[in-house]
Image (cartoon, helix red, strand yellow):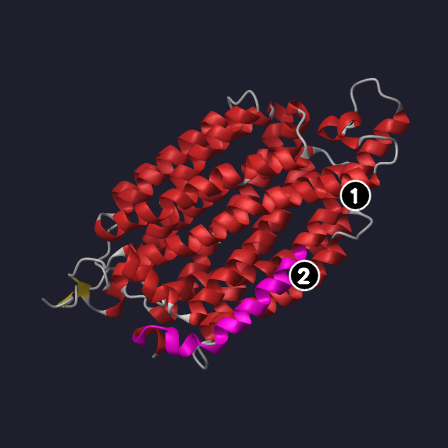
Amino acid sequence: MSDTAAAPPPLRTFDRYWMLIVILLVAVSGSIDRTILSTLGQAIKQEMRLTDAQLGWMIGPPFAIFYAALGLPIARIAERKSRTWVIAASVLVWSVMTTFCGFAQGFAQMFLFRIGVGVGEAGGQPASASLISDYFPPIRRPFAFAIYGLGIPLGSMIGGIGGGWVAQHYGWRAAFFWVGVPGLILAALAAFTVKEAPRGHSEGVQVAAAPPSLAAAIKLLWAKRSFRNLLIGAALANLATNGILPFTVPFLVRTFHLPTAKAGLLFGIVSGVAGGLGALAGGYAATVMAKRDRRWYMFTPAIGLLLAAPVYWVAFSQGTYQAAAAVLFVAVMFHFAYTSPTYATAQNFVEPRMRASVQAILGISMTLVGSGLGPVLSGMVSDRFATRAFTLGEYARLCPGGRPSEGALPMLVQACGKASATGVQQAMMCSAVLCLWAMVHYLLASRNLREDLTPAAAA
């Protein structure tokens, strides 16, 4: 039996761009619900008397572990069933669980609800990436994924600005309700208004055969040296992201004594606008330059990461919040240039029936290493540097939650605050070094890229 059927009729331009708009909104919703804890972390830390390591455990592992555990099984469903319905169900679950986070009474409950967010988000990205790839041909995929990639920074911006404002005026619990409820509407929009594109549509054929086994897909991908290096590079780049962005609001609050709303506003602008510009610029540069040489799919992320690391160090060394935010804007823009070429290139390694699976494999690697380890490692490093910077005794006992108990002497209040600020600053600078390690793997991936791409993508 042939693996392909006759070419399907073309989708309308409206269908293509409506799909992209809805999928972008889905990505925005997922990013908000995934990262809102970064904006609210300082307030939650103080109310629940947490260490930075505990805050990191709350932000990262419960989401990452269950995202990774369910990512591939749900991706396999997306290879066989309607991707639009997989996306809708995922949005519904993560939105409900985000709303539940507003009811958490302690570390354990918040941890459990964050598991629910990870369960929901496990299905969103693989199904979305597969759908985009069947709507857009290989040469236009970096552009399409650049638009889709805006979801992460836009979600961070909305969560940072809106979440910070709501938290300051109505409390951090209200912020979870504010970001969770709109997802219920978005789930219906994805289910009932987005068309399910035929498999292989962007290559001009309709795939009729069943998808290969998971073992076959993994074997095919692992045989490609460029994919292995891309996988490592993307995981390290995301590890740097999750070691820096979740602690940006705490850094601004502790170092410059900003209110939560103002720190959230700056975080939203930096992560949203700068991250979005970086994703767009990376996608555009890769699209243009790859017409001459496909290796620019990897050169573009490598250049961005090379420039990001030193600019981060400069940002965290500034004496005013205005200067720190301005330099941080540039660093995040360089950093996020890796996202669009990474997602697009991963799709170009495989045939249509493996696209959700390859996205799941990439997502699992980035999530386990980045979201799972990034906040925890950064939090542990922050606690260690804070302990070293504190000179008045035992930091953990005298400064629970980063500040002393009510009525403490001003000298102790000042010492706790200074040590807490030093800890988070040094931890973020350490995380920035990972950008250079990631750059090396993107350069290694470029060496075998042209022979590892599918024939349609390499043409």
Q: Is residue 182 visible?
A: no
The amino acid sitting under disc 1 is Thr
In terms of depth relative to the viewer, which is nearer, 41 or 16?
Answer: 41
Kindly identify which numbered label has been placed on residue 414: none
Query: Residue 65, how many percent across, how many down?
Result: 46, 41
Query: Residue 72, how many percent across, how many down?
Result: 34, 49
Question: In the shown orientation, is residue 204 left or right of residue 101?
Answer: left
Q: Are marks 2 and 1 in contact (CB under 8 Å)?
A: no
Question: In the shown orientation, is residue 334 left or right of residue 97?
Answer: right
Find disc 1 in the rendering and name its residue.
422
**Residue 443 belongs to magenta span:** yes
Residue lying furthest bottom in this view? 292
What residue span does the magenta drawing correspond to? Answer: 432-455
* Quarter of image, res 424: top right
Callout 1 crowding tier (Cα within 10 Å): few <14, some 14–19, many ≥20: many
Find disc 2 in the rendering and name its residue.
309
Q: Is residue 239 visible?
A: yes
Q: Is residue 107 above or below residue 132?
A: above
